[in-house]
Every structure is written in C-alpha cells, then in structure tokens.
Image (cartoon, helix red, strand yellow):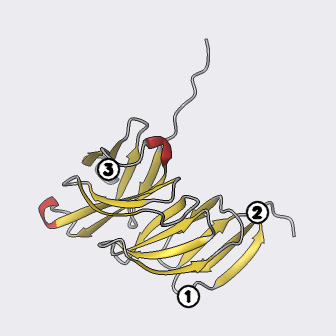
Amino acid sequence: MARQKLKSLITCFTPDGDYFAVLSPSGIVKIWNTKSGSLVAEWKQTDAPSEASISCMACSFIGKKRRKEHGTCLLAVGSNAGEVFAVDVFTGEEKWKSPGCHADGIVGLSFTNRGRILHTVGNDGIASEMNSESGEVVRTFKVSKTHISSSASCDEQLLAIASGKIRIFRWESGKELLKFSADGAS
C-alpha cells in the first residue's frame, strides 16, 4: 500500500494559551477553547491567499473574549508573497490588508499588548511592529542580513530568529541579546 503524503496544518495559540487555531489544507480555520475543548469560531477564507501560499498565522482576542458580541477574535495571516491581512473570525470581516509587508515572505507573526500590536518577521531579515487595528507599520528593525528560516516569540519581550545563526532580540529596543550557532558549534 502506497504511503500518502500528509498536507501540512498551520497552527497557533492565542498569547495566553486559552485558544488554539488550526488552518486545514481545505482552507478552513477552526479555533478551539483549550480548557473545554469546545469549538469557538470557524472561518473559511474566500479571497484570501490560497492555503499553499499561507506561511503562518496568529490569533488574539481583543476586548472581552467570553462574550462574542463584545469582543473580536482577530486572526492575522502571513503569506509567502509577503502579504499580511487580518480578519475578525466571528464576523468574517476583513479588517485590513498590508500587501508587500515583507518582500520575500512572512516567517512569523505574534500578537502582544492584549492583541493591539502585531509583530511580524519576514524572510527579508526585517522585524516589524504593526497596529493590529489598522495594519499600519509602527516601526521596523533589522534582525538578519540573510534569509530567515524560522522565528519564535513566547512572550511580549523576546524574539528568536534562525538563519545561519540563532539570534535573540528584545522587541522593545530591537537590540540583539544573544547570538549562537544553530548546530551547537562555537
């Protein structure tokens, strides 16, 4: 029996870890409550980039998350083409689109400040801070001279990126705190 190739899922947690979002190969995003396991929201992309071109996503609640009618569940999606867009998954309304945010594609997205700020990292070696309500770029700083393969941010303060080396930056200042070899060599 031939082995089938599994299609990748794109996933993310909200900053507080209370919710988990999954983008399936069919283009449907489902968001679950991690404590109860209940489905909170579902969204199907319409004119958004195709599933194959989406590189990452981030999800955050803005306002009161316990009552749908008083809060917004904002989903930010990054593409391999460098576009970032945000949608309210409760209403399906696209909030904003930022084409060409990072020319070589988006590597990572993360929300901070209770969902009011969106951090982006691009393959172009640039990290950006955006107003999540408007999509306006507030500031940028250089994190690498070479192509970035991966990024991670577990809190509102630190950013880790991997290119030829692994680098740790402070989001607030853009200052590099650590740099070391990805393979453990000196």
- Compared to 1, does 28 lie above or below? below
Disc 3 marks a residue whose amino acid type is Ile
Per the image, the residue denoted by label 1 is 173
Q: Amino acid at mark 2?
A: Ala
Where does the C terminus fall, quadrant-wise?
A: bottom right
Contact between marks 1 and 2 (CB within 8 A): the answer is: no
Q: Nearer the viewer, mark 1 or mark 3?
A: 1
Observer-nearest residue: 43 or 106? 106
**Looking at the image, is mark 1 or mark 3 earlier in the sequence?**
3
Looking at the rendered structure, the secondary structure element under dot 2 is: loop
Residue that label 3 marks: 31
- The spot of residue 155 in percent (x, y) is 49, 73
Camera-side residue: 111 or 138?
138
Q: Quadrant of the N terminus?
A: top right
Residue position for label 2: 182
Q: Is residue 93 left or right of residue 180?
A: left
| Crowd tier of the residue under label 2, counting other residues whose Cα lies within 10 Å: few below 14, some 14–19, many 20 or above | few
